[in-house]
Image (spheres, rainbow, N blue to C red):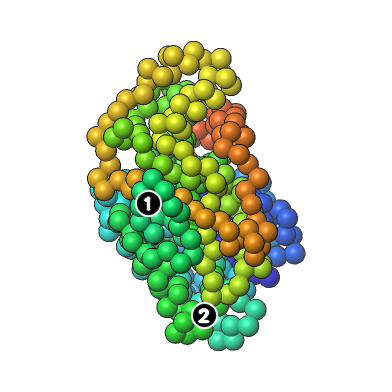
Amino acid sequence: MRILVTGGAGFIGSAFLQRAVAEQPQHTFLNVDKLGYAANLRNLAGVDQAPNYSFRRVDLTDASLIATTVAEFEPDLVVHFAAESHVDRSISAPRAFVDSNVVGTLNLLEACRAVWRDPAGKRFHHISTDEVFGALGPSGSFDETTAYDPRSPYSASKAASDHLVRAYSHTYGLPAVITNCSNNYGPRQFPEKLIPLMILNCLARKPLPVYGEGQQIRDWLYVDDHVDAILRVATDGKLGETYLIGGGHEVTNLEIVRTIIAEVASQTGAEPAELEALITYVPDRPGHDFRYAINPTKIREELGWTPRETFSTGLRKTVAWYLAETDWVRDVQSGEYREWMRRQYGGDA
Ligand code: NAD
Ligand code: TYD
């Protein structure tokens, strides 16, 4: 198969490529990424040497460049990760989210529709989020029948992209499958998201900013478990279907921060009380969704997928990774990774 991966220099896309390229030498992978602020080609260390892997810098908002790229590569499978992904940025600057997530997805769909005259054996796998379903109260969970109710510019743009994928499947017969997953964590996540931000701030003894009272709840999924689910859906998921992927670990934000403190203290010998004192309550995020939770029955029963990591094993691995990968951390914090990509690819990378 020829597999086109979008957004493969980001957190989840690079975890997918790290596994799939090594495990599937019989397949050819092309990674297209615009190399935005959250992209880091060093996430692909090792993969970038593989004979079945190549990279092309493409911004999906450039309709003609993605059309040419798809026409030249002729993919059998598209795994579409590329998106602007951070809720706080979508609140301060929503337009980039509509550009990349909505228009970018439309351009990619159009490119595939043009090339896949005969859709037999082709597949478009759209990666989405549980945030499209809105916010839950203290009980209940999302499943594949839950109505869409996005509430942030990020989730609205992801919902729009899901609707476009379904519309292309329904109207043009484009062979598509959608997965909506809960909050991911693990190695190589850009340190603007809760877990890596808290780990690195603990290490630097910087304030740990907790929004509001820290009582919001997320359902945390270790990134490699997500990759495992994607690989199953990409091969065995039914076309035209949606699968929800959840970690099954619901925790309040404050509990997360305290668990991170305990883990960092245990792995570094720091004094937990010194790290606890860094917790700083800051004004809440506008429109902050209270709780997300996923009912994973469908993917478990149809595809036999369940997460392997518990929150404590996943978090232990994640903290250990950020402690060990000091070059990656230094690069990201100094901005050197962008300078390095700019030297290779030019532009504003
Ligand atoms: P990320 O921000 O780490 O990476 C996104 C990548 O997409 C970056 O490399 C970026 O350069 C690229 N990109 C953005 N806009 C692009 C464009 N116009 N053209 C080409 N490339 C572009 O995000 P992530 O956490 O790896 O998320 C990947 C996907 O998973 C996204 O679609 C996101 O909505 C979804 N998702 C993420 C989470 C999570 O917890 N991280 C949860 C649910 C769903
Ligand atoms: P985040 O990692 O941004 O993911 P999402 O908003 O997509 O769920 O945030 C996870 C939770 O942590 C969310 O409820 C907001 C909260 N949060 C903080 O309390 N402080 C922070 O500095 C950040 C980045 C997030």
Vertical order, 118 against 76 (above or below): below
Instruction: Determine whether, in the image, residue 66 is placed left or right of residue 289.
Output: right
Q: Secondary structure at mark 2?
A: loop
Query: Which percent across, then down, holds residue 275?
Result: 43, 18
* Total numbered circles: 2
Mark nearer the viewer, 2 or 1? 1
Vertical order, 267 against 252 (above or below): above
The Cα atoms of the two marked residues, 2 and 1, are separated by 32 Å
The residue shown at (45%, 73%) is: 165
The residue shown at (61%, 39%) is: 310
Vertical order, 212 against 241 (above or below): above
Label 2 neighbourhood size at 10 Å, few (<14), some (14-19), many (20+)?
A: many
Residue tagged 1: 136
The residue shown at (66%, 68%) is: 236
Residue tagged 2: 174
Q: Closer to the camera, 192 or 349?
A: 192
Mark 2: which amino acid? Leu
Mark 1: which amino acid? Leu
